[in-house]
Image (cartoon, coloured by chain):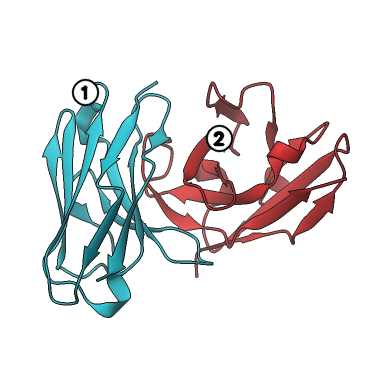
Chain colours: A red, B cyan
Amino acid sequence: EVQLVQSGAEVKKPGESLKISCKGSGYSFTSYWIGWVRQMPGKGLEWMGIIYPGDSDTRYSPSFQGQVTISADKSISTAYLQWSSLKASDTAMYYCARPLVYGDYHDAFDIWGQGTMVTVSS
Amino acid sequence: EIVLTQSPGTLSLSPGERATLSCRASQSVSSSYLAWYQQKPGQAPRLLIYGASSRATGIPDRFSGSGSGTDFTLTISRLEPEDFAVYYCQQYGSSPTFGQGTKVEIK
């Protein structure tokens, strides 16, 4: 079964760093891009960026460029989303997702992780 | 960046009725790179339609997508109880973006 399993919920203070993960299984992890999507409480979906684990080619939405870092470790089939200094406005659910077609990030997301809730509060 | 505007914000309908959801893009969406997702409370989004009109695996045929260029539509021919949810469109051409969502609620 193809699936993406994300790390658990996090509660952090402003200014702290954080790295959340997304582990792929049931498919060739290095052949598909993995994207990240933010959903703030009660709000819509926002496309953050995407990485190709095969060569770590990464693209960011202009809204998130410089705010987060996306990375991947292909040896353990895991993608990451990290912050160096969290803000209260980073409080949201974060989803990782895989496109339909291998090798192409211009594609719809057909496999989604269960989401990781990040709460940033003093 | 392409801005997607969905309308209406909320659609109040009864089971068995037809739902028509609109997604309008600020500029033409290349190669019909347009998808629709369904999201229920507490769940991750689920892909319904890609390529503007192709149903994803396992999606019932009461869901259909149409449109091209800047105007796209998701139609649910007869609403089932499990269809009441929030629906998002997404363009995945240049710098992918999502619309703000349409909530389909029980009237």
Q: Amino acid at mark 1?
A: Ser
The label on residue B28 is 1
Q: Residue at x 41, y 33 (%)?
A: B97
A100 is higher (above) or lower (below) than B38? above
Residue at 71 percent of width and 51 percent of height: A21
Tell me the number on the disc at residue A46. none
- Seen in the picture, residue B59 relative to A122 is either above or below; the reply is below
Q: The residue under label 2 is which amino acid type?
A: Met
- Which residue bears the numbered disc 2? A48
Quadrant (top left/top right/bottom left/bottom right) for the C terminus of chain A:
top right
CB under 8 Å between callouts 2 and 1? Answer: no
Q: Is residue A70 left or right of residue B1?
A: right
Residue at the limit of the structure toward the front, as seen here: B107
- Give residue A36's position: percent from left, percent from top: 57, 42
Q: Nearer the viewer, residue A27 or A121?
A: A121
Mark 1, Cα crowd under 10 Å, few <14 / some 14-19 / many 20+, is: some
Q: Position of residue A80 (x, y in %)?
A: 70, 43
Tell me which chain the residue with mark 2 is part of: A
Q: CA distance from mark 2 to mark 1?
A: 21 Å
Q: Secondary structure at mark 1?
A: loop
